[in-house]
Amino acid sequence: ELVFSLNGRERRLVDPPPSLTLAEWLRSEGLTGTKIGCAEGGCGACTVIAVGSDGHPRAINACLRLLCGCDGLALTTVEGLGSQGAGYSQVMKAIAEGQGSQCGFCTPGWVTAMSALL
């Protein structure tokens, strides 16, 4: 059994496929803010925040992290940082107000990477 927190909610998965990446699983769960761009960890579009037992948030590439390697982590996706209905995070507001986006595909990755630093 795999147990982790996702956007503040506990998730329990039994026997997930060993080759399934976190990004693939997130997207299959409808959390499509985490993009799969290069699938090599270079573009950052797949960035999510992971907090382990040390309590420190880290930006990780969900396209490279196997889902089975997420046991015990607290994960936050861009959807967990804010939304139109729940309100936007300070990072989201700053990017929008500063028109700091290009096409927008990798913007969720930027938001989560910057948020992990705060």
Image (tube, rainbow, N blue to C red):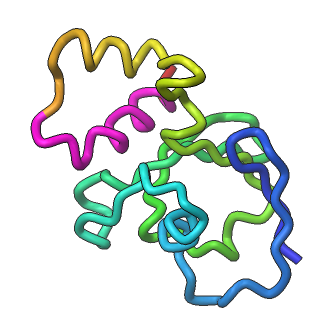
Furthest residue in direction left, as rendered: 102
- Left or right of 110? Residue 76 is right
Q: Quadrant of the N terminus?
A: bottom right
- Left or right of 72? Residue 111 is left
- Left or right of 29? Residue 48 is left
Position of residue 9 relative to residue 83, above or below, is below
- Give the total number of marks visible in the rendering: 0
Q: Does the magenta portion include 105?
A: yes
Identify the residue at horizontal 79%, vertical 57% (top origin).
4
**Along the line of sight, the residue nearer the viewer: 103 or 39:** 103
Identify the residue at horizontal 72%, vertical 84% (top origin).
16
**Along the line of sight, the residue nearer the viewer: 83 or 1:** 83
> What percent of the width, then of the height, locates residue 15?
80, 87
Q: Main secondary structure of the magenta part?
A: helix
Q: Does the magenta portion include 113?
A: yes
Would you identify the image quadrant in which residue 54 lies?
top right
> What percent of the width, then of the height, locates residue 81?
55, 30
| Segment tinted magenta in the rendering | 102-116
**Along the line of sight, the residue nearer the viewer: 3 or 51:** 3
Identify the residue at horizontal 57%, vertical 75% (top origin).
66
- Left or right of 81? Residue 11 is right
Identify the residue at horizontal 55%, vertical 43% (top origin).
49
Position of residue 77 relative to residue 72, above or below, is above
> What percent of the width, then of the height, locates residue 30?
54, 60
Position of residue 6 relative to residue 107, above or below, is below
Furthest residue in direction front, as rendered: 85
